[in-house]
Image: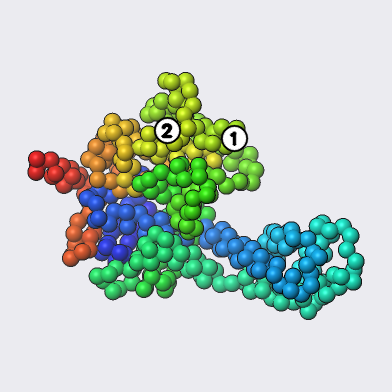
C-alpha cells in the first residue's frame, strides 16, 4: 500500500509504504503527526463510503424529525405522544433505501409508517383528531424532505465528512501556508484507490473506494481510555477521539458466527501477545468501569491508576475484544513512547511486530525515540519480517516545509539525528 501526501500543512511531499510496520522519525514540529492525520482522514472518509454516507443521512433524518416536534405543537398536535417522532424516525431510517427508488410507491410506505407508529405509541385516539395528521397535505412535505436526503449526492456527503475531519484535525488549516497549490492525499493498493484534493480547506475533488476494508484507528499521544471513563467530557465528532470512543463503548448488533469466531481467535492472540509484555489483562467491572487485573498483585486496579504509558497496550486489547481491530486492520500511533520507560518501549515495539505477524495488523508509528525505533527494526528482523519494515526521516525540504525521506536501507541516519542532543552534553 502506498500513501502519498503533498502540500499538506507543513508537508511538501511524502510517499510512504505500508505493508507491515512503518516508522516516521524526527524531531518535534517536523510534520510527523501531520502525515498521520492526513492519511487518517483519507482512510476514514474514503473507505467503505456507503457506510459513511448512510450514517450521515441517518443524522440528517434524526435532526429533521427532531425539528418537527415544535411544528407539531404549533399545528395543534400536542396531544400526540412525545416518543412518536423518534419511532417514526427509526422506521424511516431502517427503510431509507426504499425512498431512493422512484419506481416504488414510497409515499404510501411513509403513510403506513405514520399509521403503524401512532398505533404502537397510542392505542386510543379519535380518528377526527388525526385526520389532518395523515393527510397528503401534511405528509407530502415530509416525504419530499426524506426523498431529498435519501437521494443526496454521495460526493456531497463524503465531502462534508472530510471537511469536518479537516476542521477538527487541522483546525481548518490543512492547506499549506507556504505553498498555495492544492493539498493532496492518496492511497493506492491492490484493492483500494482513493484520493482527496483540498483547496482553501475545502474538498475540490474526491475519488473513493467501494470496498469495505478493515477499520483504521488513530491512537493519539494521550490516552482515550481515560476519556471513555468520563462520558460527560466533550469530544468533537469527526475526530480520532470520537471514532475510538464509539468503537469502545457503543452498543453493537449481535455478531454472526463467523464474526464471533474471528473475534475469539483474535482476542486469544492478543492476550498471548500482551501476556509477554504486561503483567495482567484489561477487564470490565459489572458496573461497566474499565479495570486492569494485575497478575503479580492478584488484584484489580482502576484504569486511572494504571501507568499512562501502558494504556496503549490496553487500548489495543479493548479494540480487539470489541471486534473492531481485526485481520488486516491499521493502527496509526502518534508517539507511543510518551510516558513509557525505555524498557517498556522495547516491549511495545515487540507487541506491534507480533500483531502484524499473527493478525496482519499494519502500523504507522511516528516517533522521536531511538529505543522504540531500534526495537521495531530488530524485532522485525528476528521474526523474518525485515522486508515488511519501512523507515522514514523527516527532513527540511524548503523554508518551513518538510518531506519524508525513505531511509529503510540506511536507518543509521535516524539514530544519528536522534542521538545528536547527547553530543551537546
The answer to whether 6 appears left or right of 273 in the picture is left
Label 1, secondary structure: give it: loop
What residue is at 78 percent from the left and 79 percent from the top? 137
What residue is at 71 percent from the left and 77 percent from the top? 141
Residue 381, image quadrant: top left
Which mark identifies residue 15? Answer: none
Measured in 3D between alpha carbons, the distance from the residue under mark 1 to the one under mark 2, in whole angstroms, is 18 Å
Q: Is residue 8 in view?
A: yes
Task: Pick whichever of labels 1 and 2 is earlier in the sequence.
Answer: 1
Tag 2 residue: 305
| Mark 2 Cα-neighbour bin, 10 Å: few <14, some 14–19, many ≥20 | few
Quadrant where the C terminus is found in the figure: top left
Picture coordinates of residue 93, whole percent (x, y): 67, 61
The answer to whether 138 appears left or right of 203 in the picture is right
The answer to whether 339 appears left or right of 292 in the picture is left
Picture coordinates of residue 175, whole percent (x, y): 33, 68
Tag 1 residue: 287
Residue 375, image quadrant: top left
Quick one: which residue is furthest to the bottom in this view?
A: 137
Between 124 and 107, the one lying in front of the other is 124
Picture coordinates of residue 245, whole percent (x, y): 50, 48
What residue is at 70 percent from the left and 62 percent from the top? 89
Amino acid at each position: 500500500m502506498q500513501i502519498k501526501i503533498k502540500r499538506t500543512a507543513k508537508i511538501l511531499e511524502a510517499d510512504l509504504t505500508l505493508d507491515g510496520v512503518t516508522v516516521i522519525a524526527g524531531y518535534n514540529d517536523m510534520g510527523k503527526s501531520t502525515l498521520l492525520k492526513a492519511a487518517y482522514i483519507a482512510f476514514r472518509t474514503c473507505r467503505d463510503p456507503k457506510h459513511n454516507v448512510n450514517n450521515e443521512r441517518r443524522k440528517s433524518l434524526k435532526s429533521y424529525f427532531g425539528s418537527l416536534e415544535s411544528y407539531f405543537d404549533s399545528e395543534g398536535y400536542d396531544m400526540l405522544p412525545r416518543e412518536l417522532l423518534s419511532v417514526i424516525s427509526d422506521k424511516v431510517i431502517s427503510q431509507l433505501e426504499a425512498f431512493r427508488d422512484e419506481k416504488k410507491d414510497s409515499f404510501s410506505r411513509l403513510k403506513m409508517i405514520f399509521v403503524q407508529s401512532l398505533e404502537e405509541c397510542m392505542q386510543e385516539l379519535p380518528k377526527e383528531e388525526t385526520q389532518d395528521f395523515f393527510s397528503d397535505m401534511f405528509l407530502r412535505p415530509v416525504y419530499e424532505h426524506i426523498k431529498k436526503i435519501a437521494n443526496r449526492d454521495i460526493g456531497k456527503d463524503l465531502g462534508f465528512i472530510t471537511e469536518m475531519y479537516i476542521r477538527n484535525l487541522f483546525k481548518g488549516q490543512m492547506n499549506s501556508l507556504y505553498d498555495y497549490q492544492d493539498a493532496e492525499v492518496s492511497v493506492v493498493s491492490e484493492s483500494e484507490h482513493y484520493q482527496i484534493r483540498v483547496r482553501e480547506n475545502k474538498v475540490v475533488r474526491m475519488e473513493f473506494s467501494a470496498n469495505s476494508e478493515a477499520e483504521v484507528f488513530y491512537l493519539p499521544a494521550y490516552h482515550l481510555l481515560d476519556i471513555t471513563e468520563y462520558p460527560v467530557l466533550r469530544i468533537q465528532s469527526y475526530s480520532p477521539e470520537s471514532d475510538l470512543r464509539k468503537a469502545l463503548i457503543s452498543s453493537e448488533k449481535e455478531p454472526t458466527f463467523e464474526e464471533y469466531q474471528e473475534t475469539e481467535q483474535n482476542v486469544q492472540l492478543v492476550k498471548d501477545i500482551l501476556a509477554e509484555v504486561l503483567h495482567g489483562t484489561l477487564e470490565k467491572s459489572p458496573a461497566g468501569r474499565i479495570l486492569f487485573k494485575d497478575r503479580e498483585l492478584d488484584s484489580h486496579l482502576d484504569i486511572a491508576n494504571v501507568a499512562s504509558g501502558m494504556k496503549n497496550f490496553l487500548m489495543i486489547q479493548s479494540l480487539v475484544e470489541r471486534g473492531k481491530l481485526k485481520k488486516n486492520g491499521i493502527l496509526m500511533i502518534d508517539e507511543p513512547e510518551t510516558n513509557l520507560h525505555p524498557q517498556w518501549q522495547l516491549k511495545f515495539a515487540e507487541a506491534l511486530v507480533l500483531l502484524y505477524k499473527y493478525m496482519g495488523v499494519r502500523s504507522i508509528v511516528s516517533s522521536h525515540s531511538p529505543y522504540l525505533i531500534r526495537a521495531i527494526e530488530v524485532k522485525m528482523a528476528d521474526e523474518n519480517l525485515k522486508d515488511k519494515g519501512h523507515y522514514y526521516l523527516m527532513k527540511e525540504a524548503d523554508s518551513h516545509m518538510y518531506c519524508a525521506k525513505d531511509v529503510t536501507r540506511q536507518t543509521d541516519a535516524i539514530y544519528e539525528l536522534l542521538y545528536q542532543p547527547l553530543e551537546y552534553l
